[in-house]
Image: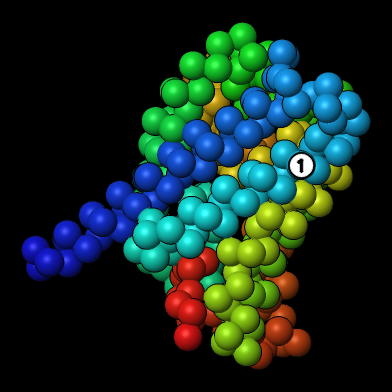
Amino acid sequence: MAAMKRKIFRIYLSEFLGTAALVLAGLSVVIGINGTGSPIRPRIPDEGLRRAVTGFLFGTTGCLITLSPVGKISGAHINPIVSVAFLLKRKMSYQHTLGFILAQMTGAVIGAFPLLLWGQQGASVGFGATIPLPGGTAAAFVGEMITSFMLIAGIFFFTGHRHHKLRRFTPYLMPPLFCIMVYAEGKISGTSTNPARSFGPAVISGLWTGYWLYWAAPLTGTFIAVGLFEMPFFGKWNIRVPKLYHRWR
């Protein structure tokens, strides 16, 4: 019993550390490229290209966390909707899903506080906070729903594919996927797809505008993706382990 408790604690701690690292490193990329006074902005004057680069590097951050010891221990969900998706696929219990989400939300806040060191450059972009942009709340909701659907569907495609060797490439989906999503949708909602990623900077910036949709829309996209993979023509996709990290063998 004691050994099991230690194992569970290590898993939750890994999710905490992984999410903290995603928020700290990933949003430092956002601030470093897009914040006022950034030396990169004059070198990449096109806003769309900056979004694409930002998305690629943010996705790369998630990829590296998944490949790290953190990913090997917990599977590197580092996102509540990933945990909920595995719950809906009956690969996690309600209790462990709640434990994962609490670890992720706490880690997001702890990872966000060092972002205050960016000072005015960080404040100019809300320290990476996501709020509905000029298209409005409805457009932001639809954008977050679609990008979250793409994220979960992509994860399921790799982790459940009948060719088990494809599963080990799951982390490498993130850089190109976020590059495309942030380029196409970033100007609408900021492209969160992750309630924890949005929670951390909201806490330190005080920017809570439309925060509810950064839960509601990603969860809606998640339900749609899970429903799709329950259809008969996806019968050969069998998710065995609720992890994004899979051994290289």
Compared with 150, 197 (above or below) is: above
Q: Position of residue 223 (x, y in %)?
A: 65, 60
Query: How many neighbours does mark 1 have within 10 angstroms: few (below 14), some (14-19), or many (20 or more)?
Result: many
Q: Which residue is mark 1?
A: 53
Report helix, strand or loop for mark 1: helix
Residue at 34% in and 52% down: 14
Which residue is most to the left?
A: 2
Residue situated in front as seen by the camera: 84 or 68: 68
Type of residue at label 1?
Val
Q: How many numbered dots are placed on residues in this image?
A: 1
Task: Evaluate whether residue 186 shows in this view.
Answer: yes
Residue at 66% in and 31% down: 30
Task: Evaluate whether residue 138 shows in this view.
Answer: no
Q: Position of residue 5 (x, y in %)?
A: 16, 60
Compared with 233, 108 (above or below) is: above
Compared with 15, 126 (above or below) is: above
Residue at 72% in and 44% down: 55
Side (left or right) of 199 relative to 3 = right
Please tell me in which quadrant of the rendered image residue 105 appears.
top left
Residue situated in front as seen by the camera: 29 or 126: 29
Side (left or right) of 101 relative to 119 = left
Compared with 38, 70 (above or below) is: below
Side (left or right) of 180 relative to 242 = right
Residue at 55% in and 17% down: 118
